[in-house]
Image: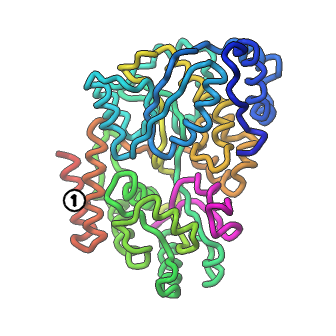
Amino acid sequence: MSSSYARPPAVVPSRRSVLRQAASLALLGPALTALGGTSAAAAATKAGSSPDFEGVTLKVLCNTPHLSMYRNFLAPAWQQLTGGTLQATAVDYTQLADTIIQDVQSGTGEFDCFDYYYYLLGTIADAGALVDLTSWIAAQGDLNTSDFLPSVYDPYTVYRSRRYGLPYDGDQHLIFYNQELLDRYGLTPPKTWAAYDAAAKKITEGGAGAYYGAVVTGQPDPLVLGPAFINRLVGYGGDLVDGSGRPILTRPAALAAAQHLIDIAPYALPKPTETGLGAATDAFMAGQAALVETWTGVAQRAADPTLSKIVGKWGVTALPLGGGNTRRRTPLNGGYGVGVSAASKNRDAALEFLKWLTSTDEMLLETTRKNSAIDPNRMSVLHSTAYAANTPSAVDLIRAGLNGTPMVWPHGPADPDNLQRLVDQLALAIEGKQSATRALRNAQDAWTA
C-alpha cells in the first residue's frame, strides 16, 4: 500500500473522540483531492459526526478474494472511525449462498453483513436471508444513490422490485494479452473471435508445449465456465434469456459461442475443463499463455514485479466480436453487492457500515489500493483521476464497459441452478462427449423445466 493511502494506527480509546476527526481527514485527504468536491471543513464536519460503535463487533461473510481488503484495510479504518470491531470470514464462492442461507435459517445468526455475488441475489433474498433496505435507502439523504453506476445499481441490489443491498464491486472481463508472444508471431490483439482463434492456434503450435495461445477457464462452474461462454455469447450478439426471462439457448449466437469453446480447446492451456480462475491467471502472469479473458483487477497484478513475470510485456483489449455482430456489450461477469443479514443483532451498526463501505471517499481508497480486487461502484470513482492513474492501461476499457448497458446475468432464485446445468452440458461438449447443439438443447430443456 502506498504511503499516500496508508491507514493510521487505531487511536487509544480514551482519546477517540478527540483524534477521530483528525484521523478521518488524514484518510480522506487523497480521495478528496482527487475528487475535488469536498472541502476540509466539510470533511471535518462529516468526520466529527461519525457514529460510535465502541464495544460492537460486526461480523461480515465475504468471498475469499475480498478477505484481505476486509481484514487489512477496512477493519482498522472502521475501528478508527467508530471504535467498533470488524471481523471478516471468507468462504469459497461455491459455498457462499448456502453459508448465508444456513446462517439465517438455522437461527445461528453469526453474521451481520453479507458480501454476495449479485447472481445469487434472488436465491438469498427469496430465502429471507437479507433485510429489505428499500425504505432505509430512500430515507438516507447522504447515500448519494444517483452517483451509483446505473449499470450495476439495480442488477446488484434489486429483486422483485425491492432493494436488498448496495453495490460494492463492479466486475467485468477484458482480454489480456502477452505482447511479447504476439510480436514473436507477427500478430495483433484480436478484435474478433475468428482472429482470436487464428492467433491461439499459431502460438500454441509454435510453442510446442512451452506456452499456449489461449486459456479457457472451463471448470464446470457458473463463475468459471459461465463467463467463458457468456463472453462469446455476447460477442456473437446473443443473450441467455429473453425479455420475459425465458432461456434462449438454442439460437444461432449461443450455438456459435458453444462451438467456439469446442474449437479453441485443442489450442488452449491443457485441460480446459480442469482449468480454474487461479490457474488461468497464474499461467498468464508466468508468461505461459498469450491470451486470457479475466477480471480487470489482473491489470494491477500483471504490473507488479513481485507477482508477474510479464511486467512491461502485456496489454489489454475489449472482448472480441463474432460473426456479423457489431454491437459491443459488456457482460457483468461476477460483481458484488453488500447487504444486512436478517438475523443481525447489530442492525444499526451494520447499516452504517454499508453506507460507509460503499461511499465515494472509501471506494476511491479501496479501488486504488495496491493490487486491489475492488472495482468502481460509483461514477465519481470510475471517472476520478486517482482511479485512472492507478489503472492506466485498462481504465478506458473499464469505463466503456461500466458506462454502457451491460448484459446482466439472470439472478432469480432458480438461476444459479440453471446456470450450473448449462455449464455441465458445455463441459461435456468441450470434452468431445456431445455436440454443441446437443449441449444447448439439453441445457434449454433443463432450464425450462
Residue 160 belongs to the span the image colors magenta: no
Residue 307 belongs to the span the image colors magenta: yes
Q: If the image is split into quadrants, where does the N terminus sit?
A: top right
**Residue furthest toward the left?**
449
Helix or strand or loop: what does disc 1 sit on?
helix
Q: Is residue 237 visible?
A: no
**Residue 93, percent from left and from top:** 39, 45
Q: Is residue 376 left or right of residue 348?
A: right
Magenta stretch in the rendered image: 293-322
Q: Is residue 18 visible?
A: yes
Task: Identify which amino acid the numbered label 1 is placed on.
Answer: Arg
**Is disc 1 surrounded by few (<14), some (14 to 19) or many (20+) residues within 10 Å?**
some
**Residue 4, percent from left and from top:** 78, 40
Quarter of the view holding residue 184: bottom right
Q: Which residue is mark 1?
A: 441
Who's the residue at 28% across and 21% down the image? 107
Q: Is residue 172 left or right of residue 448?
A: right
